[in-house]
Amino acid sequence: MIQLKSAREKKITPEMKIVASYENLSPEYIREGIARGRIVILQNKLRKTSLSKLGKYGKKKFQPVGIGKGLRTKVNANIGTSSDSGNLGDEKEKLRVAVKMGADTVMDLSTGRNLKEIRKMILKKSPVPLGTVPIYQAARRSMEKGQGIKDMKAEDMFNVIEEQAKEGVDFMTLHCGVTQSVLNILEKNKRLMGMVSRGGTFLANWILFNKCENPLYEKFNQILEIARTYDITLSLGDGLRPGCLMDSFDAAQVAELSILGDLAGRAREKNVQVIIEGPGHVPLNQIEASILLEKNLCQETPFYVLGPLVTDIAPGYDHITSAIGGAIAASHGADFLCYVTPSEHLSLPQVKDVEEGVIASRIAAHAADIVKGVKNSLDWDIKMAKARRALDWKAQEKLSINPDTFRKKFMVESSLNKRKKEKEKACTMCGEFCVLKLQ
């Protein structure tokens, strides 16, 4: 069953009902949003049988995830190995923690060895949708043959896309907008950081060396055939995203976004669901404009943003810089936040980095949902306020975005506060001068 085709035929699928129930919206709202290209459902149609009975990491079973207008802002967690670091056990633990902390999706960005083995593990164990960047595997295979990235054949790229689709991958980042024309614009308008998208840079080098057009753009219809067959959502990648504030909103970035808007329209014509990826490093005062530009150029296609990071000077704290930008971006209409961890720009994320990155992005997403008026989003805060007013520590722990952290912090407080009876306990900030006890 193809979600977009069904939606246009006014058919409500089981997946639409699941998403509607999760979002506290009507199935008809979800169907209409999909039909108009404003909502997508991430689920490879092969996943229905392969994961329907799993009960991993606190989730009852694999569930499709809806992304788009009127829905809760979703958070993605990137995991995966590099050529320098990572193994299967580490990635399994990162997956467990990402899901436990509330990530709505995960992406496998592995570029080291055993890519197929890692992806197979994630597909088997993950109760949330999986995304990939197929060109990473195509590049790795080329290198394992003793060749360079520039030596890849176009069919190598398409073979990997189809292979991953058959395995059950739910959404794929494809840098179809990195074209000869966009690279010419980039050449004429020099950047401080140049290109920082790994997949985009792979393709740019391939295009320049082979002196021909990006095959993912030139043969986009071939991609659409694969995507429609498996009902994969295309995540049209921003190969020209800015890697520093000085490069934000330049001519090459806007030119690529315009191409992605055209490709998104072509995808929907073929009943293929699509989202658009966005920046990147963006100053605070440009975030709203960047969201509005994407929504206009891409006909309100769901927008998936990395951060955005609002300053370049905080290595080690970029989960914070991205949460600031993510909250602003989502409040102005971004639909999907890719987390950034404290190790961004420094190293391959470790398990603790994954935890902190997911929580930071979830805080940003929830703060934005309140502004956007997403249904029931403010209820959570009201319940927490009532629990605080009643000094109900058990309820506060349960309502906390990360109950483990709440519990650890409060246990320290409790040990310092043993003289008080349980029912009178206040935190050690105010002690006997707790304003809630003085009222």
Image (tube, rainbow, N blue to C red):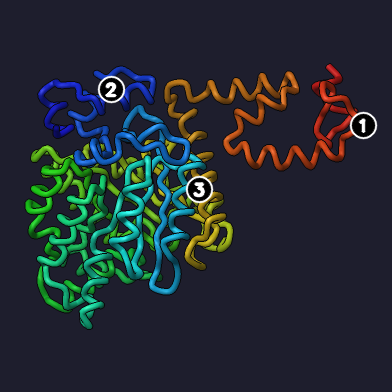
Label 3 packing within 10 angstroms: few (<14), some (14-19), many (20+): some
414 or 250, which is in the foreground?
A: 414
Which residue position holds label 1? 419
Which residue position holds label 3? 97
Tell me the quarter of the image containing the N terminus: top left
Residue 130 position (above or below residue 23): below
Label 3 SS: helix
Q: Residue at 35% of width from left, 56% of height from top?
A: 108
Q: Is residue 328 visible?
A: no
Label 2 near label 3: C-beta < 8 Å?
A: no
Which amino acid, by three-letter code, is at mark 1?
A: Arg
Residue 33 position (above or below residue 354): above
Residue 17 image label: 2
Provide residue 29's location: percent of width, then percent of height: 27, 21
200 or 101, which is in the foreground?
A: 101
Which amino acid, by three-letter code, is at mark 2?
A: Lys
Provide residue 383's location: percent of width, then percent of height: 60, 21
Label 1 near label 2: C-beta < 8 Å?
A: no
Q: CA distance from mark 3 to mark 1?
A: 36 Å
Q: Residue at 27% of width from left, 39% of height from top?
A: 42
Outermost residue, bottom direction?
146
